Amino acid sequence: DGGITQSPKYLFRKEGQNVTLSCEQNLNHDAMYWYRQDPGQGLRLIYYSQIVNDFQKGDIAEGYSVSREKKESFPLTVTSAQKNPTAFYLCASSPSGSSNQPQHFGDGTRLSIL
Amino acid sequence: AQSVAQPEDQVNVAEGNPLTVKCTYSVSGNPYLFWYVQYPNRGLQFLLKYITGDNLVKGSYGFEAEFNKSQTSFHLKKPSALVSDSALYFCAVRLQGYGNKLVFGAGTILRVKS
């Protein structure tokens, strides 16, 4: 079945450490997105990519970085500059950046601080 | 600014009774509206969308939503609630001119009691 795979499911970060969250999709979608979910705040967009080798900052990009070297992969790095990284991170994809089709979501990675 | 509001943090309903989860929006131009559901520690699942056409939209699992342009609302409804409907529900609006970017409401917890 086609879908989005996020790994790991749980991740722990030490002070000063960068960590990378994986997102892989086999839906052949052009566009991919990273969201951060905090209780009571809904989802906030971190970065998005409408095509390979291109990405744009979302609303809360500071302290995060991404790459889009392959169509199916959109990894997110949480850098040490992100002072409050504890959250649930969700990756999504859609057929294209201008589609009316809904975004499809992975099952998330929960990041905590040690 | 384009935004979505879900005025209720939580909705409680008895099994078998009708349910409504409210959503209002503020966008420029024609709105593209979505409802998603999230179960604990899972990603978001698409329920239904309004792009154009009939104001009453039918979706997955017996859910429907009514688009009301004059009241700028897109309330989610179900005629008869199930205990298994208990989850977190998000309303979202697609931003015009920004690809397929979505702005999400803060979410509403639905609790259905038997």
Image: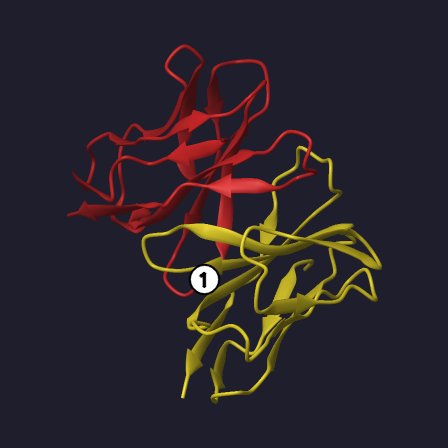
Chain colours: A yellow, B red
Kind of residue at disc 1: Arg
> Which residue is disc 1 drawn over?
B42
Determine whether B32 is above or below A86 in the image. Answer: above
Where residue B112 sits: x, y (%)? 21, 45
Q: Residue furthest top?
A: B70
Q: Residues within 10 Å of mark 1 (few under 14, many from 20)?
A: some
For image coordinates 16% across by 47% down, the residue present is: B113
Residue B14 seen in this snapshot: no
Where residue B86 sits: x, y (%)? 29, 49
Q: Is residue A39 left or right of residue A34?
A: left
Q: Chain of mark 1?
A: B
Residue A46 seen in this snapshot: yes
Nearest to the observer: residue B50 or residue A49 = A49
Nearest to the observer: residue A44 or residue B75 = A44
For image coordinates 31% across by 30% down, the residue present is: B22
Tally the marks: 1
Secondary element under disc 1, as helix, strand or loop, is loop
Where residue A55 sits: x, y (%)? 75, 55
Where residue B39 sits: x, y (%)? 38, 57
